Amino acid sequence: MQNNIFSYHILAKYYDEFQSYSDIESMQNEISESIAQYQQPEIADLGCGTGIFSLALVQQGYKVTALDLSEQMLRVLKAKKAQLPSSFQDNLRIIQADINEYVFPEKQDILLAMTDTLNHLDTEQFVNFFSVAGQNLINDGLLIFDLLKLEYLLGERANQTYFVEFDLPPSDSHYLRNNYGVVDSDELINFDDDIVSDKLFGEQNPAVSMIWENEWLENEQIAISNLTFFERVADSKQYLRFFDQIIEYYHDLENIEQIFCNKFTLKKSIDFPERRLFILQKISDCQ
């Protein structure tokens, strides 16, 4: 997750709850099939986020370098890594860096950029990404990434508002203050009125609720998500309110080959409900 890095300051904590795991599991299978031809490949997961793909590959026995610019996302990934058996932990290296600037000391066999990573790049950054990826890949190495489909952005994400509840244990303000830096007096809200509380949160009084407001800017081909979180303080009727915003850029899936045609060949593309998966191979001797 790259371009608007501070967008994931809050969302990182809940990021995994957003993912469509039916799509992800299918894409993971495609990735595993594609990289099976490589013997002990060097794999880098660019814009790794909380490590959904990195961890899956590590548990298959691969060595992975997970790279992201977001300190908050990597904090979640490091916590997940700590729960792995030590043999798996040794196979996961975590780096905080910009995917459009970082050059690996040794060229990689496989580069991944999954779950909308490249939709966080504007057009100029998107074009530059393929140049940097070419520098970081061996000849005939694979670049695997997904992009959001226009029909998804125009449907589920265009000017739609969703109310989401998370089944997570409630936090206390000290945890959020120490780890996220979001707690000050005007963000701590009392819902002593049960009628107001029930209308907003329902009778279940969930630990975390979120209002997800989407906006589609047609001329700019940009999707904006404004997120308002209410996190219940343990054993109270107080909620912490905090905000996040995600900006994603649509990249024309039909003309994408014009961007990478001199550096990569398209081996395969696969449509999923929300995204299209691309598997590219670096052209030999292309820098």
Image (cartoon, helix red, strand yellow):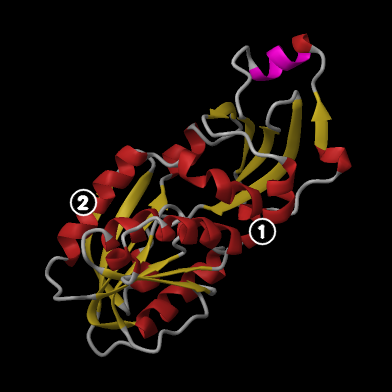
On screen, residue 136 versus residue 190, left or right, reads left
Amino acid of disc 1: Phe
Q: Nearer the viewer, residue 35 or 232?
A: 232
Residue at 64 percent of width and 49 percent of height = 10
Q: Which residues are magenta?
A: 196-201
Q: Quadrant of the C terminus?
A: bottom left
Q: Nearer the viewer, residue 117 or 281?
A: 117
On screen, residue 171 versus residue 99, left or right, reads right
Residue at 48 percent of width and 40 percent of height = 18
Mark 2 Cα-neighbour bin, 10 Å: few <14, some 14–19, many ≥20: few
Residue 36 x/y as whole percent: 14, 65
Q: Is residue 49 visible?
A: no
Q: Residue furthest right?
A: 185
Picture quadrant of residue 211: top right
Whether the magenta-drawn stretch holds residue 200 is answered as yes
Residue at 50 percent of width and 37 percent of height = 154
Whether the magenta-drawn stretch holds residue 43 is answered as no
- The tag on residue 6 is 1
Amino acid of disc 2: Asn
Residue marked by disc 2: 29
Residue 195 x/y as whole percent: 76, 9
Q: Secondary structure at mark 2?
A: helix
